[in-house]
Amino acid sequence: MKIIPISLPTPFYIGPVNVYLIAEDPITLIDTGPKTKEANEALREGLRKARIRVSDIRRIVLTHAHEDHCGLARSLRDEAKDSQVLVHSWESGHRVGRLEYEEHRALLTRAGVPPGEIQRMRKMYEGVRKYADSFEADEYGELRDEEELEFSNGALRILHTPGHTPGSCSFLREADRTVIAGDCVLKRITPNPVLSPDPVDPSKRFASLAEYLVSLARLRSFAPTLVHGGHGEPVHDFEELFNRYFRAIRERQTEVIRLIPKTGTTAWEVAQQMFPGADDVHRFLAVSEAVAHLDLAHSEGKIALELGDGKEIYRPISAR
Ligand SMILES: [Zn+2]
Ligand SMILES: [Zn+2]
């Protein structure tokens, strides 16, 4: 069972995205790239090199539903008749009529983001939506943790590895401990735990960073020999990456705690201090990052959190 990486251009800051072809019965594509002419052409070129036609694809599997990964899923599915699309039920980015705007607005308001700023973020995300088609609820199947994607010659074990998004999944080939990890593992950057409503209780936010640390530890428990990420080169030394991520997360946490004045502060204010020049999508990602680290510090009892005026105010423990 050969895993064939295909790199596709994206219009996003992160650069090219990796999708993975498994040219084994049933022919499977893991992630699809964004809905752009350039990505579509590069994908077809990659398939052609592997002597596969779009119409041969029987299964489209999504590591998660960000536009750079799921954008072409619908048009590929329509072209490859009867092919199946699979995604974890905690993912929402691919769904028609998702309610997330309201839920996100509530989360951002609680994080202290000013209304005008939320409006800007919303506009920006609406702009990004054009890079992906949506699915009706009955048009995709579910990826379930610990189940297997079977092939005529081998299998991939589905691992639910939440953190970057609630429904992020990785895929393990046990024979040689190779993992396809989507944006859970990226060689050059620490993946952003994106601010999301909790899929079980959308009025709460998803404990993205705490979940992410569990996912990383779970991947580590398989002692992977090779990890294919959603962007950039594959990772051969997962142990080194694991330690580097943990160090980076701890350092960032220390920095975040240091930014909290005795009088208390919001995640928005912390984000402004951490990433003063952040623009565009990075303003949302900055808030995501601040919230993720503040949440983790709070869950570990390192800082206090109270609600004041509809906003969450973080305070150093010593000031109480
Ligand atoms: Zn992503
Ligand atoms: Zn990505």
Image: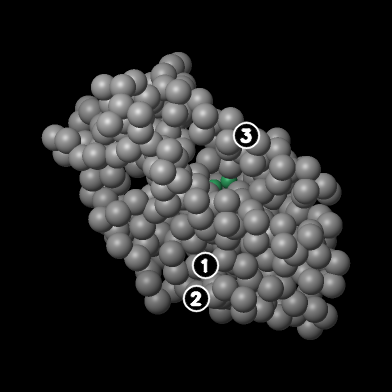
Circle nearer the viewer, 3 or 1: 3
Image marks 2 and 1: residues in contact by CB distance under 8 Å: yes
Closer to the chain start, of discs 3 and 1, is 1
Q: Amino acid at mark 1?
A: Val
Q: In the rendered image, which residue does mark 1 sit on?
A: 87
* In the image, the residue with mark 3 has its CB under 8 Å from the nearest atom of ligand 1: no
Q: Which residue in the protein does label 3 denote?
A: 248
Is 156 on the left-hand or right-hand side of 95?
Answer: right
Q: Report the front residue among 215 and 54.
A: 215
Determine the secondary structure under disc 2. Answer: strand
Task: Pinpoint residue 291: horizontal percent, then vertical percent.
Answer: 39, 38
* Residue sitting at x 36%, y 57%: 198
Q: Residue furthest left?
A: 309
Q: Amino acid at mark 3?
A: Ala
Give the CA separation, mark 2 to mark 3. 36 Å
Please name whichever residue, 114 or 206, is drawn nearer the observer in this view of the structure.
206
Q: Residues within 10 Å of mark 2 (few under 14, many from 20)?
A: some
The mark total stands at 3
Label located before the other in sequence (2 or 3): 2
What is the image's colouring? one colour
